[in-house]
Image: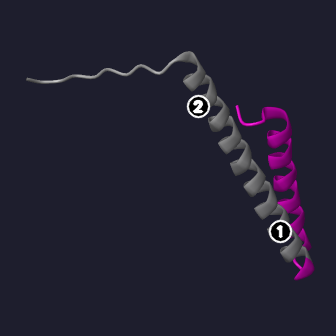
Amino acid sequence: GELQIEVRPDERFETHLRRLERAGSRIVLALVFGSLTLSATLLTISGMQTLGLIGYGLAGISLLALLFRGGE
């Protein structure tokens, strides 16, 4: 004999999985925002204001993505 087991996830499992995926996406966006902000600050402090401003702009875009998209 052979034994076969078939498991199907229920609705609650899929709901929890979607919530975890959204949370992971939010964490990634938050890390991108923090990294860009830190990098832009270091560039500005070291005298590269133009690159720093570009970094702040990119950080702002990632912050808007985090706030409005929220990890969809």
Q: Which residue is mark 1?
A: 38
Three-letter amino acid code of the residue under disc 1: Leu
Where on the picture, by quarter, is residue 6?
Answer: top left
Q: Nearer the viewer, residue 2 or 31?
A: 2
Q: CA distance from mark 1 to mark 2?
A: 32 Å
Q: Residue at x 88, y 71 (%)?
A: 41
Q: Which residue is mark 2?
A: 17
- Residue 10 percent across, percent down from the top left: 51, 18
Mark 1 vs mark 2: which is more N-terminal? Answer: 2
Quadrant for the C terminus, please. top right
As drawn, 26 above or below 2: below
Q: Is residue 51 left or right of residue 32?
A: right
Count of numbered circles in the view: 2
Asked whether residue 21 is drawn in magenta, I would say no
Q: Residue at x 47, y 21 (%)?
A: 9
Q: Nearer the viewer, residue 39 or 48?
A: 39
Q: Give the magenta-colored segment's residue range.
A: 45-72
